Amino acid sequence: MQNDLMLLLIEGTAHTIDSHAEELTRLDQAIGDGDHGINMARGFKEILAQKEAIAALPLDEGLKRLGMALVMKVGGASGPLYGTLFIEMGKAAPADPPSLVDLSAMLDAGVAGVKARGKAEPGMKTMLDVLCPVADTLRDRANNGEIDRLDERIIATAGHALHATSLMEAKRGRASFLGPRSVGHIDPGACSSALLIGAVVGVLAPQS
Ligand code: ADP
Ligand code: MG
């Protein structure tokens, strides 16, 4: 991946998280401890500070460094999980610029890492409830070569999946302490995942 593209991805994701930090915090106040926006903004501020160094690395190394920065800076439950997502994506990254099929395989590897690390599956009201359907859509489309309006399809998948977390009872993380009282609220980590996906699509779609 081009150095310039990585810079745009870092700037785009960091800006999106920063401008939605209050919303993420509000969601976490309802069913958690109210720190998700602060945690994510701290992590992405660090990535922004390291953007030149990350973008200068080959894609695999850059993603691993980005993931490590999130582990160190985000903290909470989400830091190690998002860190794992990017580190595992880095491990699965090809030496050449990634094709859509490569990107899909990278996201699958990242999601598998999050599942293993968090001992979670879709349906437990976590970030996986957005990441998994998006990975499924990307895999289906990339492998079938159906790339017409893929950006819209991915954004729609993420948005629909995000809102569906409201119907779920949390089975992992702090929200699970609330049991049935977690129903009726959108999951904060699912929201940050949807925001990150939107930001990545917003950068990559105009390039394709
Ligand atoms: P903490 O819960 O430690 O305060 P954050 O508020 O930063 O951490 O992140 C909370 C989010 O982390 C949740 O909304 C959920 O999406 C995600 N999460 C928590 N536990 C898990 C898990 N075991 N697997 C996947 N995601 C999880
Ligand atoms: Mg929290």
Image: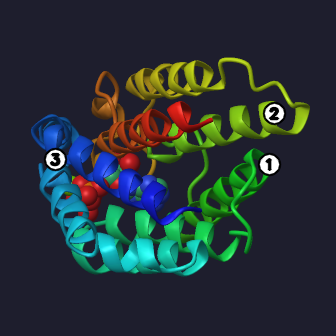
Q: In the rendering, at what x and y percent does residue 124 appear?
A: 51, 43
Query: Residue visible at 17% across and 49% down?
Result: 37
Q: Label 2 is placed on what type of residue?
A: Asp
Drawn side of residue 146 relative to residue 107, left or right: right
In the displayed structure, 81 sits above or below 40; it is below
Q: Label 3 is placed on what type of residue?
A: Asp
Query: Residue visible at 51% across and 25% down?
Result: 155
Q: Label 1 is placed on what type of residue?
A: Val
Residue wearing tag 3 = 18
Q: In the rendering, at what x and y percent does residue 205 appear?
A: 54, 32
Which SS class for mark 3?
A: helix
Mark 3–mark 1 Cα distance, whole angstroms, equals 30 Å
Mark 2–mark 3 Cα distance, whole angstroms, equals 32 Å
Mark 3 Cα-neighbour bin, 10 Å: few <14, some 14–19, many ≥20: some
Mark 2 Cα-neighbour bin, 10 Å: few <14, some 14–19, many ≥20: some
Mark 2–mark 1 Cα distance, whole angstroms, equals 10 Å
Which SS class for mark 1?
A: helix
